[in-house]
Amino acid sequence: MKANFIFFISLVYIACASSIKMPTEKNLVVAKFKWEDSNLEQLQRGYKLFTTNCGGCHGIPEPNNHTNKEWETIVPQMSKVSKLNDNESLDILKFIISAKTDTTKI
């Protein structure tokens, strides 16, 4: 029974993680609406930091789970907990906002 539960949780984790993709030029277009100086390397760093640091403690939240304003509060708070610097925090924020697909939560 315990093995089935662990297997199920593993599948859920993989399913959630796989819905968040490495950013592309499409994400960059979105990021540039808010941050004109954005580049793809920043978004890719943000993706890696987001998936490794956030996912390492509590699972990877979906970008659509919060509004941009909520993310602008959450990311700096969690970055302090993870001991990330301001540039790393901004890269994560840029990635999250560029990865959102639900335009009703902007």
Image: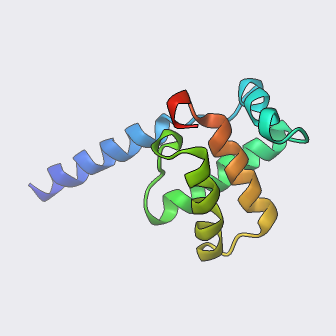
Give the residue at x 50% y 39%.
Answer: 64
Q: Nearer the viewer, residue 9 or 33?
A: 33
- Seen as rendered, the residue at the extreme right is 37
Q: Nearer the viewer, residue 54 or 10?
A: 54
Location of the C terminus by quadrant is: top right
- Seen as rendered, the residue at the extreme top is 26
Q: Position of residue 31 (x, y in %)?
A: 76, 36
Marker count (numbered):
0
Q: Position of residue 45 (x, y in %)?
A: 75, 49
Q: Quadrant of residue 41?
A: top right
Q: Is residue 83 above or below residue 22?
A: below
Q: Is residue 13 above or below residue 98?
A: below
- Is residue 102 among what the camera can see? no
Drawn side of residue 95 relative to residue 7, left or right: right
Q: Nearer the viewer, residue 11 or 87?
A: 87
For the rendered model, the colour scheme is rainbow
Q: Position of residue 55 (x, y in %)?
A: 50, 57
Give the residue at x 81% y 61%.
Answer: 87
Location of the N terminus by quadrant is: bottom left
- Seen as rendered, the residue at the extreme left is 1
Q: Quadrant of residue 79?
A: bottom right
Drawn side of residue 32 relative to residue 59, left or right: right
Drawn side of residue 28 relative to residue 19, left or right: right
- Is residue 70 among what the camera can see? yes
Give the residue at x 55% y 53%.
Answer: 70
Drawn side of residue 24 relative to residue 35, left or right: left
Give the residue at x 76% y 60%.
Answer: 88
Q: Position of residue 54 (x, y in %)?
A: 54, 59
